[in-house]
Amino acid sequence: MPQMVKHETTWGSVRKGDRWPHEDSTPVADVNKKVAWTTLTFTGDDGNVLQSLTIRKRVDETVTVYREEPTDEEKDAQHVELMRDLLSDNLRKMLARTPIKALEAIIEKVKNDEYDYDVLTWANLPDVLKAQATYRQAMIIRGRLTRKSHARDGRNVTVEDATLDELLDAYAAWYYANVERSSGRFGPRVDPTSRSTSPISNLLEDLEVWAIGEMLYRITWSGAWEDVLARVEQFKSEAKNR
């Protein structure tokens, strides 16, 4: 259950739902902030506006309010659920943006224009190539998610119903195979002596490096970076003990 937390603040920072002058007071029902003044409305339990109380205070005046906030356990649970949602959404969106769909969108835009002979241009071709690069990495993660989950308990796990542990395992397995073990902890390395004489081949190689970096950015943004690295260390420890 949420807890009431005492806050020393100003009238200009009072929020809807705050209680004043004590924690059993009627919560603020509406806040109308101006440059110098803020007007707060307190409404009775029955929600009848006719029984409301309105006060007007200067925004810089200090006040003590009581604010309903989640407990530490609830915050941890919210953090876990948010991390799971972000990892799942990132993977789902990259899987949905296939290179074929990116190409079809371009074709659909120009197919009714008989004079538009430039189907693929400097402006739209990168979209297809980037979609191809990120889709490949997403498919690797989805494959690891499915294989690890099926091997563990026989379930056919989808991206949408995967647990946080299953997602972290899949992302960590991808990181271990595609970043740390094959390229080093600090990201993919490109040997300049291995470059092809074909500019297109080199471009596709560069895009794969970019896609790995994009995936690392998404993992970091989801808040799962430390958790993924912890799983990677676990994989390495398990590999040594085999």
Image (spheres, rainbow, N blue to C red):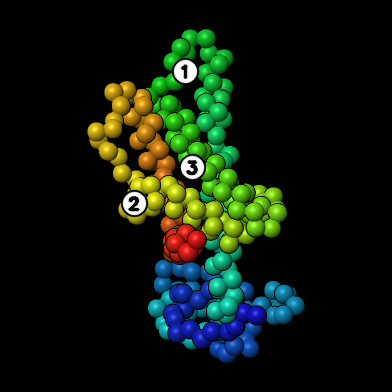
Residue marked by disc 2: 184
Disc 3, SS: helix
Give the residue drawn at x 38%, y 41%: 210
Q: Please tell me how crowded label 2 is: few (under 14), some (14-19), or many (20+) other residues with Cα within 10 Å.
A: few
Residue marked by disc 3: 137
Vertical relation: 165 (above or below) 180: below
Residue situated in front as seen by the camera: 85 or 208 = 208
Could you give the CA–CA distance between mark 1 and mark 2, rounded to whole angstroms? 39 Å
Q: Please tell me how crowded label 3 is: few (under 14), some (14-19), or many (20+) other residues with Cα within 10 Å.
A: many
Residue 14 horizontal side relative to residue 48, left or right: left
* Quarter of the view holding residue 220: bottom left
Instruction: Please state the total of marks drawn on the protein image.
Output: 3
Residue marked by disc 1: 119
Q: Earlier in the sequence, mark 2 or mark 3?
A: 3
Give the residue drawn at x 55%, y 34%: 98
Residue situated in front as seen by the camera: 223 or 70 = 223
Vertical relation: 110 (above or below) 143: above
Q: Earlier in the sequence, mark 1 or mark 2?
A: 1
Disc nearest the viewer among 1 and 3 = 3
Percent of width and height locating residue 149: 63, 54
